[in-house]
């Protein structure tokens, strides 16, 4: 009973210390917040390209094409005159100018060639290719609604997933895993290093508690802190609708989060015992977490990356954490859940063993 009380007291002390230490909070939270802001900016810049539409024909067919362009997921349309459109393109306010000629309706009725012009600011190949693909798609939609549709080839789409996931939503899962990793590694490392840097480790070693209780308290405090922050993030995400597992899928999501936090807490304790100083622990923890973030699909789907990166990613525990959380939160799928949980269980066990051995060795040396 006395050992349990000591474990809980050490854990509570570390939690309170973290709450009262703005620098520790900043080190843990600022990188995920920065990546989140980047994702919001990138999503806004790449989701729909800004274009100016010059409709020189006011006929019904021309206006129907304008309506299709407005409704397209590929464009953010701004109506303009020819002079206004040229100015918008020259000043980088739009990526392209789409011109519907004055003879559009007449040419359509007479079945004459009816070109729609597009002038593209081809700054880079990414959005240039998007524009080159998107306008023909819109024109195909235009003809598909006509009774005398000359386009005889259609597309029969079959989706692998039950619904589409917004880019920002999709990127929130790797950012959540980054947050868990940073909180565990950095907070666990700082909580351990603090005892050595402030020389309070001597007092703890002289206290009538076992080394096992001290180690368990350190890891438990870090794990609880990580889970409390994760709970707050999950509640806010569920209320906003960004991350909301359906039904019983909350259970695997919480289990995966708990395992990631436990593994990170063990690694953090090992870092703290190894470096015993704030600065190197923070630097090492942030670098480890960010590398894991990118390898687990932080900016792209890992399966679509070059083969050698995919190979490395499959040796990255957070890759399996991201995969399990995406399945539970977005797709209500358990396809790879057994594999993912098994890898995370082994990782958590390995992280705990590493943290316990590193701390025990350091405590013996300092005794």
Image: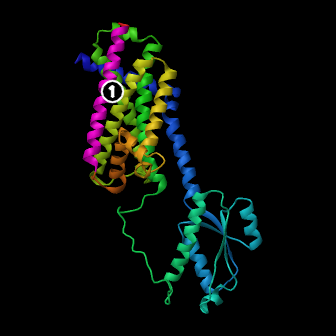
Q: Is residue 216 magenta?
A: no
Q: Which of 111/176 is in front?
A: 111
Residue at figure coordinates x 38%, y 8% from the top left: 366
Is residue 151 placed above or below 317 in the rendered structure? below
| Span shown in magenta | 336-365
Whether residue 20 appears in this view of the structure is no
Q: Is residue 74 left or right of residue 86?
A: left
The crowding category of the residue bearing disc 1, from other C-alpha atoms within 10 Å (few below 14, some 14 to 19, many at least 20), is many
Is residue 14 placed above or below 211 in the rendered structure? below
Q: Which residue is identified by label 1?
A: 220
Residue at figure coordinates x 56%, y 52% from the top left: 42
Q: Residue 178's spot in the image, x, y percent? A: 44, 39
Q: Is residue 124 left or right of residue 241?
A: right
- As helix, strand or loop, the secondary structure at mark 1 comes to helix
The picture quadrant where one finds residue 308 is: top left
Residue at figure coordinates x 48%, y 18% from the top left: 277
Q: Quadrant of the N terminus?
A: top left
Query: Residue reaching furthest left?
Result: 1
Colour pattern:
rainbow
Q: Residue 261's spot in the image, x, y percent? A: 36, 34
Q: Quadrant of the C terminus?
A: top left
Q: Is residue 219 left or right of residue 287?
A: left
Q: Residue 139's spot in the image, x, y percent? A: 55, 77
Magenta-highlighted stretch: main secondary structure? helix
Query: Residue reaching furthest front?
Result: 308
Is residue 20 placed above or below 75 in the rendered structure? above
Residue at figure coordinates x 38%, y 43% from the top left: 311
The picture quadrant where one finds residue 194 is: top left
Whether residue 254 appears in this view of the structure is yes
Q: Is residue 136 left or right of residue 197?
A: right
């Amino acid at each position: 009973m006395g050992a349990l009380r000591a474990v809980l007291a050490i854990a509570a002390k570390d939690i309170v210390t973290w709450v009262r230490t703005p620098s520790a909070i900043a080190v843990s939270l600022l990188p995920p917040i920065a990546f989140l802001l980047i994702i919001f900016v990138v999503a806004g810049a790449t989701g729909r390209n800004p274009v100016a539409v010059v409709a020189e024909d006011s006929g019904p067919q021309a206006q129907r094409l304008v309506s299709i362009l407005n409704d397209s997921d590929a464009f953010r349309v701004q109506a303009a005159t020819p002079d206004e459109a040229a100015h918008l393109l020259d000043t980088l306010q739009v990526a392209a100018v789409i011109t519907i000629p004055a003879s559009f309706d007449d040419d359509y009725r007479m079945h004459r060639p009816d070109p729609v012009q597009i002038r593209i600011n081809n700054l880079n190949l990414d959005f240039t290719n998007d524009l080159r693909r998107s306008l023909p798609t819109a024109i195909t939609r235009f003809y598909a609604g006509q009774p005398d549709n000359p386009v005889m080839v259609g597309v029969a789409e079959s989706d692998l997933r039950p619904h589409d996931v917004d880019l920002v939503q999709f990127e929130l899962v790797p950012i959540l895993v980054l947050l868990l990793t940073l909180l565990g590694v950095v907070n666990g490392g700082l909580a351990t290093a603090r005892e050595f840097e402030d020389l309070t480790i001597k007092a703890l070693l002289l206290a009538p508690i076992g080394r096992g209780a001290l180690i368990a308290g350190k890891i438990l405090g870090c794990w609880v802190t990580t889970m409390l922050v994760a709970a707050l993030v999950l509640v806010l995400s569920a209320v906003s609708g960004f991350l909301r597992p359906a039904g019983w899928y909350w259970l695997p999501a919480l289990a995966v989060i708990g395992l990631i936090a436990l593994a990170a807490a063990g690694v953090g304790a090992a870092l703290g015992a190894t470096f015993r100083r704030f600065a190197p622990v923070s630097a090492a923890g942030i670098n480890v977490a960010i590398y894991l973030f990118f390898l687990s699909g932080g900016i792209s789907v890992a399966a679509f990356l070059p083969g050698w990166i995919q190979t490395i990613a499959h040796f990255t525990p957070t890759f399996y954490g991201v995969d399990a959380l995406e399945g539970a939160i977005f797709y209500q799928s358990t396809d790879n859940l057994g594999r993912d949980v098994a890898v995370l269980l082994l990782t958590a066990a390995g992280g705990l063993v590493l943290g316990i051995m590193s701390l025990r060795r350091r405590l013996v040396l300092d005794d």
